[in-house]
Image (cartoon, rainbow, N blue to C red):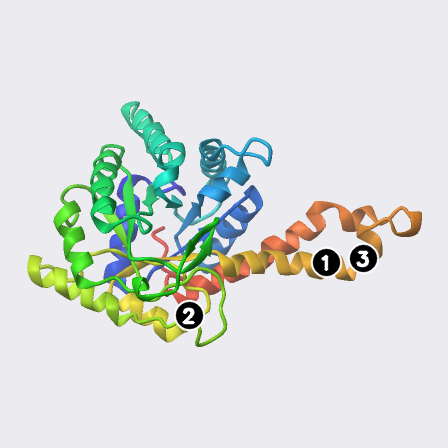
Amino acid sequence: MPIATPEIYAEMLDRAKAGGFAYPAINVTSSQTLNAALRGFAEAESDGIVQVSTGGAEFLSGATVKDMVTGATALAEYARVVAEKYPVTVALHTDHCPKDKLDGFMRPLIDISLERVSRGLDPLFQSHMWDGSAVPLEENLEIAQELLDKCARARVVMEMEIGVVGGEEDGVVGEINEKLYTTPGDALATAEAVGLGERGRYLLAATFGNVHGVYKPGHVKLRPGVLKELQEAVGGKYGKDKPFDLVFHGGSGSSLEEIHEAISYGVVKMNIDTDTQYAFTRPIADHMFRNYDGVLKVDGDVGNKKTYDPRSYGKAAEAGMAARVVEACEHLKSAGTKIS
């Protein structure tokens, strides 16, 4: 089954942690970018994660509809059909959901999964992210407790964030300051509040200088050793080695050394968005510049239907993004590790 069942998703995460690799989690905003992600995973012989943000889900529903649940549901249903043709296993995930969008995004989607599970079906998505980085830690953890309980009943993995990812994503801006580094105290409070898997499985996006978007070298200072400190602080108290399944956000521009160090401390998922956006758009720009008089009816001419047909540049865009997904799989060491 190309779309992971809850059991297979758990196996994927366990295999990544035990095998010292991480899955690329590719943000998509359309059926075409979804196909590019699936193609990339297949070419790399890697299982993977496809995810949609609140803004991506809104866009997927249509520019005049702007309904996040509709867009996310449509993506998940479409993915179930097309993924059957690819020889890899893929999990579906929803990205950053802040407090003010919980009632319009994450909670309704979990309700859909609860209803599906009650009928003996798999959940609609395999995991959802609660982003409480903009609220005080105590409130963040209170909401996480409620959501984790609901996710567990829906057979869904929850992702949560402690600390702040800098930069901007979907209109949410995180300042670049000391809050970019999660502390051992934050991690201990998290383990106390939501447990270490016994109350429901979750992924933890702990921050170590991460920033969304692209910045010039030297602007962002990643400290992967922060993750080691968190794992050791909590692991020492509870007698567990690498107790957290960690997520790497804001990784554009990171060096391979930084990525591999983070994986060694228990990162099993790394979000990829900015880089694949560019990889998708760059071939389109190339096509437009090379076929300027064909894609436009210049001076009243008729243009060239073969060059302004969306499929002509769409195929190039898909290939460009798929190649970047393959590169991500290689960087994260998931290439060649598919389950079946």
Q: Which residue is mark 2?
A: 254
Quadrant in the rendering for residue 103: top left
Q: Which residue is mark 1?
A: 287
Residue 125, given in percent of the width and then of the height, sits at: 37, 38
Q: Nearer the viewer, residue 181 or 43?
A: 181
Q: In the picture provided, is 148 more to the left or to the right than 166?
A: left
Residue ID at (50%, 59%): 274
Residue 81 to residue 139: above or below: above
Determine contact: label 3, label 2, CB under 8 Å: no
Quadrant in the rendering for residue 252: bottom left
Please say whether residue 266 is visible from this viewpoint: yes
Q: Mark 2: which secondary structure?
A: loop
Q: CA distance from mark 3 to mark 2?
A: 35 Å
Q: Residues within 10 Å of mark 2 (few under 14, many from 20)?
A: some
Sequence-wise, the earlier of marks 2 and 1 is: 2
Q: Which amino acid type is shown beneath numbered disc 3?
A: Tyr
Residue ID at (21%, 56%): 244
Q: CA distance from mark 2 to mark 1?
A: 29 Å
Q: Mark 3: which secondary structure?
A: helix
State the count of labels.
3
Q: Which residue is mark 3?
A: 292
Mark nearer the viewer, 2 or 1: 2
Residue 112, given in percent of the width and then of the height, sits at: 36, 28
Sequence-wise, the earlier of marks 1 and 3 is: 1
